Image: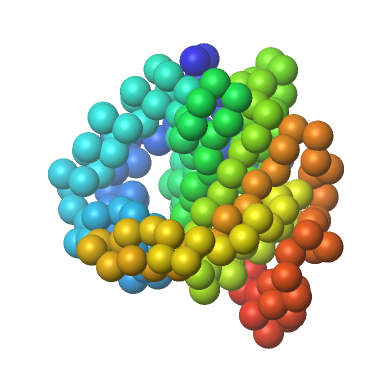
Amino acid sequence: MEIRTLSDGAVWLSPPTAADTDDIIAHCQHPSIGQWTTIPVPYGRSDAEHFLTDLVGPGWAGRSPTWALRPAPDGPVIGMIGLSEQDASACEIGFWLAPDHRGRGRMARAVGLVCEFGFAADGMGLARISWRAFVGNYASAAAVRRNGFRYEGMARLGALHRGVRRDEWRAARLHGDPPGPADDAWPAEFIASGNVVRHG
């Protein structure tokens, strides 16, 4: 697949490179990233090198692109977002954002850009983009909910995370779903201001 850089003028998404290694390692030390994602913990240089060499490169060669989220065209990595191929017409979205850069709408913007590319005929031509998160990750849910993802339920003990089974939320956006907020498609607990922590 042709490498694509995406931007809306406020955030920039481009493939991470070896030059980003130190930033990736530094961000992945934060407990909140390890708590809600499947990155190795502890996270070291060999993990970053494996990610860049064995996941990012082959992902772009296939249909599982990964982008580094940057605050400027040549800015440092402040987050990561990607699509993992499930079949020829469906992918799953995943992402993390450095704590110092949350609460500014950046991850929601990034999710919107990636979905636009994923559904576009001159992008990936997908019919469905799914999302999963461990129960309690309201920040991640807020980012996808603001981009038209519709809640599909909870899988009880649906995920194995470092040897422990955890409940998992699931949602998805289809090609024909509108891109704006999908509040009406989510349970009230996600809408309550006391529970929603803005993720980027």
Residue 12 visible in the current orientation: no
Q: Residue at x 72, y 38 (%)?
A: 174
Tell me if residue 73 comes above or below residue 180 in the rendering: above
Quadrant that contains the C terminus: bottom right
Residue 126 appears left or right of 46: right
Q: Residue at x 26, y 29 (%)?
A: 53
Q: How many marks?
A: 0
Picture coordinates of residue 147, whole percent (x, y): 73, 50
Q: Can you tell which quarter of the image residue 30 is in?
A: bottom left
Residue 109 appears left or right of 40: right
Picture coordinates of residue 88, whole percent (x, y): 54, 21
Q: How is the image coloured?
A: rainbow
Picture coordinates of residue 97, whole percent (x, y): 49, 57
Residue at the front extreme, as displayed: 156
Residue at the left extreme, as displayed: 46
Q: Residue at x 65, y 35 (%)?
A: 128
Tell me if residue 124 comes above or below residue 138 in the rendering: above
Tell me if residue 47 comes above or below residue 199 in the rendering: above
Depth check: give the residue in front, 145 or 18: 145
Residue 102 appears left or right of 120: left
Tell me if residue 129 comes above or below residue 117 in the rendering: below
Q: Residue at x 80, y 41 (%)?
A: 177
Residue 19 visible in the current orientation: yes
